[in-house]
Amino acid sequence: MHIYLKQEVYLSNFKSNKLDKRGVAMEQFNIKAVVKYSGINAHTLRAWERRYGVIKPARESNGRRMYTPDEAERLKMLAELVAHGHAIGNLARLTDEELRALHRRLINAPAADGVEAERARPLKLVTTPQAISESCQRVLDVLSNFELEKLHNELLRAKAQHSARSFVLDVALPLVITVGERVLTRKMSIAQEHALSAILRVQLGDIVYSLRRGVDFEGAPSDARSFKVTMAAQDGDLHEFGILMSAVLCAVYGVRCHYLGPNLPAQPLAEAATILRSDAVLVGRTGVLDRRMKGSEQIDYLRDLDRMLPAGTQIWVGGALECDLSQVTAGDGARQVRYIRSLQEFDAWLRKLTQHVPDARDSGDAVKEVREGIS
């Protein structure tokens, strides 16, 4: 049995010692091939295996997963049904025959008007900027109409079709910015913004913890995996999406992160970072503070952190910058304070931490540079 991609190119076979009941060597495929065929990104696939037991792939002597053709086909059907709004927890309990029957009824059925036409729309792996923009637009359309169940399903669809990194940079970030702008111009209501926030927060949090629970970033050197970042938004700032998306990026690159949420005073943040032995503290700030929360001025907050954090712990500031960072420390240069202008810059910084730098020095040198605060 061969599995064929939509482009009519079959997946390469990988030899294995696994035999069928007749003693014949079985065709098996590695995770890269199955990801390409099914359209499920690797971190989602591993999370489904671990949390829902959708399949139990065999492992080679080196620990790498190997999949049979039937397992790859099951994953493909699961991905398409999830994209049409079905819960993976419910689908995981179905046998292969039950899954095929449901798939034939909903996916392969002739297109009809209305809801059935939407259900019959085939799943496509999103890769182009145009397609990603369309993905965001579908979310905005259902949000505009307060169709919250559809909003949930569209975000699930986008998450299944994107890598975790792409979901943050190409879906979540543009959505948060666009909806915020529409609220300011009264094209959307605060209630709609909160509806998106409530659902998106769950999706992003799920990615963070699914990546942290046993899914290693294979490309990260051991030094990178030992680098720890504790992050929070400062007191008075109730907007957490900047740091939450930063936490996802850390998890994507295998950097250990501890996300403590919004509205956190300097003292408990410093205490947590000390207990967790963090190499850096990332403080998010949107510049939109709730004055009823009696939040600190940014310079005072950062100076408090500088005073309470152990020597050698870096301070990273993300988002709005409303003070002179050179005035944060005592001036002896003992602590590195870094401003991160955007999620894209943070992504590039993490890439430097976890991959070989351009001149092919050892990746451990890149980690050392980050620890020493060298740009």
Image: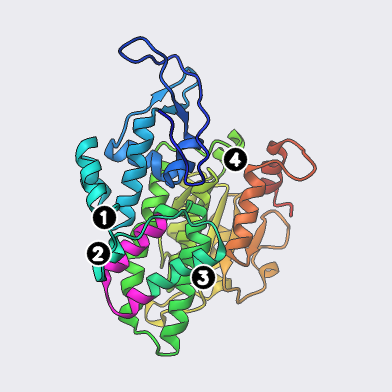
**What residue is rendered at 39% in x and 71% in y?**
138
Marks 3/1: CA–CA distance? 49 Å
Q: Which mark is first along the chain, 2 or 4?
A: 2
Total count of labels: 4
Disc 2 packing (10 Å; few <14; some 14–19; many ≥20):
some
Marks 2/3: CA–CA distance? 44 Å
**Residue carrying label 1:** 109
Type of amino acid at the residue the image marks with label 4: Ala
Type of amino acid at the residue the image marks with label 1: Ala
Disc 4 packing (10 Å; few <14; some 14–19; many ≥20):
many
Q: Which residues are magenta?
A: 141-159
Discs 4/1, front: 1
Q: Which mark is first along the chain, 4 or 3?
A: 4
**Residue carrying label 2:** 116
Quarter residue 255 falls in = top right
Q: Nearer the viewer, residue 43 or 290?
A: 43
Location of residue 6 in the rendering, given as x and y in whole percent from the top left corner? 47, 46
**What residue is rendered at 36% in x and 9% in y?**
23
Q: Which mark is first along the chain, 3 or 2?
A: 2
**What residue is rendered at 22% in x and 47% in y?**
102
Disc 1 packing (10 Å; few <14; some 14–19; many ≥20):
some
Marks 3/4: CA–CA distance? 26 Å
